[in-house]
Image (tube, grey):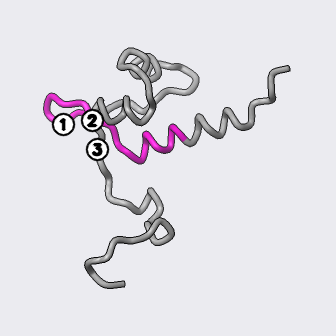
């Protein structure tokens, strides 16, 4: 592959092999489509807590791979849930 071309989806490395990337509060809220207050309530959830932020100076940021892993867990739990009749 030439140096200047971007990898396709099939060529992209797994999440665990990608460089760590930080997400700001707005990025996390946008990805989950939730409010700030719900996000912080999810962080305190005793059963399925959302990953806590890390602090860089005074900023709170989230690790993208942890956010994506949480989203996959939510999807997996919901897909396994028996249908409500």
For the residues labelled 2 and 1, the Cα–Cα distance comes to 11 Å
Instruction: Give the x, y percent position of residue 3.
Output: 27, 81
Callouts 1 and 3 close, C-beta under 8 Å: yes
Magenta-colored stretch includes residue 62: yes
Instruction: Count the labels in the image.
Output: 3
Hey, which quadrant is residue 53 in on the image? top left
Disc 2 vs disc 1: which is toward the camera? 2
Callouts 3 and 2 close, C-beta under 8 Å: yes
73 vs 39, left or right, is right
Which disc number belongs to residue 22? 3
> Which callout, 2 or 1, points at the residue further toward the start of the chain?
2
Residue 40 against residue 10 in the figure, above or below = above
Instruction: Give the x, y percent position of residue 76.
Output: 65, 40
User: Which residue range is magenta in the image?
Assistant: 54-71
Which disc number belongs to residue 48? none
| Furthest residue in direction left, as rendered | 57
Disc 1 target residue: 56
- Which quarter of the rendering shows the N terminus? bottom left
Disc 2 target residue: 24
Instruction: Give the x, y percent position of residue 26.
Output: 30, 30
The residue sitting at 80% across, 29% down in the picture is 82
For the residues labelled 1 and 3, the Cα–Cα distance comes to 10 Å
The residue sitting at 31% across, 76% down in the picture is 5
18 vs 69, left or right, is left
Residue 52 against residue 18 in the figure, above or below = above
Callouts 2 and 1 close, C-beta under 8 Å: no
> Which callout, 1 or 3, points at the residue further toward the start of the chain?
3
Per the image, label 3 sits on a secondary structure element best described as strand
Taking depth in this image into account, of 32 and 19 the one nearest to the observer is 32
Residue 31 against residue 8 in the figure, above or below = above
Magenta-colored stretch includes residue 67: yes
């Amino acid at each position: 592959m030439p140096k200047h071309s971007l990898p396709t989806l099939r060529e992209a490395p797994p999440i665990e092999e990608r460089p760590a990337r930080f997400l700001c509060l707005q990025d996390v809220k946008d990805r989950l489509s939730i409010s700030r207050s719900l996000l912080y309530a999810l962080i305190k959830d005793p059963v399925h807590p959302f990953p806590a932020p890390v602090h860089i100076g005074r900023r709170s940021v989230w690790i993208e791979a942890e956010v994506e892993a949480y989203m996959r867990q939510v999807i997996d739990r919901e897909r396994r849930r028996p249908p409500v009749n």
